[in-house]
Amino acid sequence: MTETNAGSPEPQDTPKRVIGTPAPAETHTLLAKGDDEPAAPAAAADELDEKSAKRAERVVALFFVLTFLASIAFIAAYVYVGRDGGMHGADRTQQANVLLGGAMTLSFMAMGIGVTIWVRRLMTAKQIVQERHGLASPEEDRRIFAEGALEGGADTGLAKRPLLRRTLLLAAAPLGLAPLVLLRDLGPLPEKKLRHTFWRDAVAAAKAQGKPGVRLLVDGSYRPLTISDFDSPGGMITVVPEGIEQTADPLNEVAKAATIVINVPPELFKPLKGRENWHVNGVVAYSKICTHVGCPAALYEQTTHHILCPCHQSTFDATNGAKVIFGPAARALPQLPIAVDAEGYLIATADYDVPVGPSFWERGATQQ
Amino acid sequence: MSTAELPKAVDGPLTFIDDRLGSTTFMKRNLKKVFPDHWSFMLGEIALYSFIILLLTGTFLTLWFKPSMTDVIYHGSYVKLDGVKMSEAYQSTLNITFDVRGGLLMRQIHHWAAILFMAAIMAHMLRVFFTGAYRKPRELNWLIGLGLFTLGLLEGLFGYSLPDDALSGAGLRITAGVIQSIPLVGSYIMFFLFGGEYPGQDIIPRFFTLHILLIPGIILALVTAHMMIMWHQKHTAMPSKDQAETHVVGYPFYPVFMAKTGAYFLFTFGVISLLATFAQINPIWMFGPYDPAAISAGSQPDFYMGFLEGSLRMMPNWETNLWGYTIPWNVLIPALVPLGLVMTGAGLFPFVERWVTGDQRYHHVNDRPRNAPTRTAIGMTGVVFYGVLWLAGGNDIIAYKFDVSLYATTWFFRVAIFAGPILAFIITKRICLGLQRSDAATMAHGYESGTIKMMPNGEFIEVHKEPEEEQKAVILSKEEPKPSLPARDENGIPAPATKGLLGHVRARLNRAWHIDNITVEEGHGHEAEGADRELSKGH
């Protein structure tokens, strides 16, 4: 509560309070009183005697001097953190942040406090009253305007010359549309680009060289993956097709072609109909791009064999064609047919048979 | 000449300008413009000042930021990422952080100010809604405010996408996926926006232009309009014995309000810079550059986007395939419906309320939320709806921190999104009516003074006291509803406004709006203490 209440003594006739009873409610009226009630002494310098005014002035001055010093400190800190030519990494950055930020905070805060004390203790402040006026224009003005508008409209002749009016509209329509046409080159048309991934081109290139399929490279290190990398059942490895680095825009290709390879214990693995030879003894490959809105489905729970997308928690069953178990995704993760080549490397023998990633209108009702 | 003469240094330039613009008349009128005081009127100011801070720090950041997705190999002063391939945008953000002195501070101030900007807008909108400050003549400013909020969401989304780190990339990926789901044109819009396939090379330069030029430009224009309309219409006031529909009481703009608001700007900047100094935000160097094949668990957007994230998370996986075309309801509904409901509802509300209540008057003195129970209850319905969506956006964090099943949290939110708002409506309305009853009791019997008195016969009573003038004025600021429109006039002719289906609906809504109103009126003039004795005997 504010000074307003601090000074208000309890009325004489009020009986003494017994210990343990709540304080008389009059010190907290239903609506908290604002600090600037007309009666509040807070805002009136003339109610302050000269001595306390002087004291308040000194306090304000102290805060202003503090702001001055903090700003000087800010400049000094700036010079200091740049000694021997730059910040040279994380440690100095941290130091710079604390020094510069601390000085800056201090200078703003001290000035804010100074001004506040100045307003509350030293500034002559009286509430004043202002009339509110109707906002609407006088009837007379409205009438004169309406007359003027009608007269002007008649002067143009638009109302009685339909040919003029209609051709003007005709002229305006394409004129407004033309700038939209300019936006056409913002991007190419989707065509069939969302329907296939780099796996298709990579497999085709490999087959042209007489190979049975394209090797799976570990994302990041680009090391080809062998079946012996999966000696023990366990984690999940992200792979991309061989040759993806050499494409024109590798990130675009990775964004569609990223694939996860999981070693599901063979006794648990239930290959779907028509996909009996798409896995290698339980080692199975699914698209990493979630069928919900396209985040990488990057979490794999080894005990339950669930693949989880961390963005919206769509959960897929790795043992059963990556079908959706929970969450907002509507479709299973597409499966990549894989095999082993003569040298023991894992290869993909074809592209995904359905578009990967989020749904779109012309995607079609291709199988789940 | 007047008795008051300005110092030459002020008078000279002022006369120069006034001779050419006639500006002194305007300044005479506005020098002592009244600003009523209430703590809740400061919320909008926080938003305004955060916006100014955003403009200042944002300009600073553009001096070094390179909006380019060209691949580079990093060899900067942050050794942990040495030799890593990344985009120029990410590299330049690292450089701002680790090589530009104060760069990290400015980045963190920028981000914290953005969060405070959105939080302040929300708090300000809630204040305006619950006090009925959007009523005639202020509907236009309410709509401008909604526009500012929407633009703020977009501006934030574009802004945190710019550094091109792993986390912001996930946000972009979701944006692309949502756009792609739009029926008929989704993939086309996605290709046009991204300049081809996701992620492409264009999105960051494009978002950069939108983020630093187009949207802030529109925001600045709308903020200016918002302020000018507020200035012209004068501020609303909270009910008090001093305030009235015909006048406003408060401090003059110059010097008191100016000094106060100046101090307030300094405090806002001070608090944001304190946060930026000690509370780390968006440490992009820890996330690494964007890689479409990588993501970390617990990815969260900024808080103001959380409700969209939540609605995506709780939606069941519905998708329709018709004649070879796909409609992904699981993405469309959560992306469009909640935002659409909240924004359309908020935009139409002033007009629907005016239509339902038939109240065409100006309102300059605000309502206390309790005195408009239906409005307050609808507002709380919206708040709970938004709140459930927002919490659902963090369901993985909730599941982890409280050690409950992730799927259980999802199911909880799926139920809560329907049950929560309904409960909120009922409970809020009851609370409002309870508070009205308490006001009515205060007016009739005085307020409970907290003083227990022992009567000569040994009986204890609590002394009730006559409320003070101010308290009475506040309580009596409640308007008693006018009786709803009669369905028929005295000749039995149906009133025009009640005819037809629309008129019927209106009459029904009008009744629902005012039903269970508690009448609050002046006491019956008896001594407070005497009344109290009767009251206590009755118990």
Image (spheres, rainbow, N blue to C red):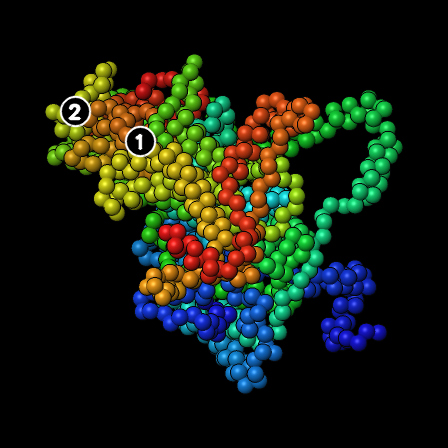
Left or right, B42 with reference to B536? right
Q: Which residue is mark 1?
A: A327
Q: A96 above or below B89? A: below
Q: Secondary structure at mark 2?
A: loop
Q: Few, some or many C-alpha atoms within 10 Å of disc 1 (few <14, some 14-19, many ≥20)?
A: many
Residue placed most toward the observer, B472 or A191: B472
Q: Mark 2 sits on what residue?
A: A269
Q: Residue at x 49, y 76 (%)?
A: A63
Q: Position of residue A261 (x, y in %)?
A: 23, 32
Chain at numbered mark 2: A
Q: Residue at x 43, y 39 (%)?
A: B425
Name the amino acid, label 1: Gly
As helix, strand or loop, the secondary structure at mark 1 comes to loop
Q: Residues within 10 Å of mark 2 (few under 14, many from 20)?
A: some
Residue A157, given in percent of the width and then of the height, sits at 86, 28
Question: Where, quadrant-wise, is the N terminus of chain B in this rendering?
Answer: bottom right
Q: Estimate the x, y position of residue B303 in percent, counting from the top left.
A: 41, 47
Disc 2 residue type? Phe
